[in-house]
Amino acid sequence: MKKSMLILAAGAMFTASACSSTSTDTTGNNTSTAGTASSTDASYGGGTAGTTTGTTGTTGGTSGATAGTTMDMTNMTDAMFMMTAASSNMLEIQAGKLAAQKATNADVKKFAQMMVDHHTKANQEMMTLASQMKVTLPKTLMPPHQAIMDKLNNKTGKDFDEEYMDAMETAHDMDIAMFQMKSNNAETPTVKAMAAKTLPMLQSHKKMATALEDKVD
C-alpha cells in the first residue's frame, strides 16, 4: 500500500516535471533557452521546445502506466529522455550516498553503494552522449526525483530503510519503462544503443530492490 501511494505520487509529479525540466537544466544566464534550442534542432524534430516538452507529460500512455506514471512516453523525445534519465541517475547517486550513511540494514547499505557506483558510470556515459548531441542535461534533480530525496531526508532508522527501498523500486520502474521504450524506438541510433545497453542493469537493480524491500518492510 505504501509503495503504491509512492508510485502514484511520483507519477503525478512527473507530469509537472515535463513542463519544468527546461528550466531545471539551467546552468546560468540563458543556458536553459540556448541549450534547449540546440536540443530542439538536434532531437525534438522541429517545433518549439516548450510545446514539445509540455506534450511529454500531459496524457497517460501505456508505457507510462507500466511504471505507475502519468507520462505519455510514446511522445518523449530523445532529448527529454536523456534529461530525465540524467536526473534519475543523480537521484540514484544522491540517495545511495545518503543510504550509505543512514541505512541500518547492512544489505541496504551494500545495495546503496552499488547504486552510487553503477549510476555514476551510467551518468558519465550519458554526459558524453549528450555532449555529442548538444543536449543540455539538468544540473539539479527534476521535481519527482527531488520529492523522493525530500522524503528520504526526513526518515531515520528502519523507516529510512523502508522508504529508500520503496523509492528504489519506484525509480527503477519509471526508468525501465523509459529505457524499454527508447531501446525500441529512439529517434537516434546512439540513444537507442545506449538505452538497450543500460536496460538489463536497471532490470537487475529492480529485481534486487524488490527482494530487499520485502526484507526490510
Image (spheres, helix red, strand yellow):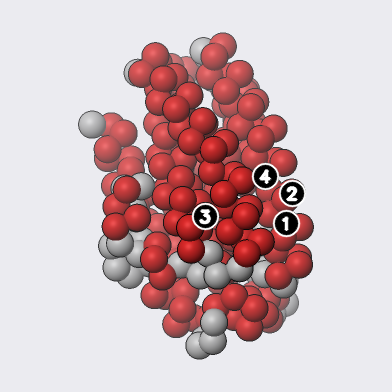
Q: Which mark is residue 200?
A: none
Relative horizontal placement of residue 129, taking residue 188 as reference (left or right): right
Q: Which mark is residue 124?
A: 2
- Mark 3 lies on a secondary structure that is helix
* Number of disc labels: 4
Tell me: residue 58, above or below residue 10: below
Rendered residue at 41%/20% (across/down):
211
Q: Nearer the viewer, residue 165 or 41?
A: 41
Q: CA distance from mark 4 to mark 1?
A: 9 Å
Tell me: residue 14, above or below residue 201: below
Q: Which mark is residue 122?
A: 4
Q: If you read the primary sequence from the N terminus, does the residue marked by circle 3 or circle 1 appear first?
A: 1
Relative horizontal placement of residue 174, taking residue 94 as reference (left or right): left
The amino acid beneath tag 2 is: Gln
Q: CA distance from mark 2 to mark 4?
A: 5 Å
Q: Position of residue 9 (x, y in %)?
A: 32, 48
Mark 2–mark 4 CB contact (< 8 Å): yes
Rendered residue at 48%/24% (across/down):
208
Q: CA distance from mark 3 to mark 2?
A: 19 Å
The amino acid beneath tag 4 is: Ala
Q: Residue furthest top?
A: 106
**Other-residue count near label 1 (Cα within 10 Å), few / some / many at <14 / 14–19 / ≥20:** some
- The residue that mark 1 highlights is 127
Rendered residue at 72%/41% (across/down):
121
Rendered residue at 32%/48% (across/down):
66
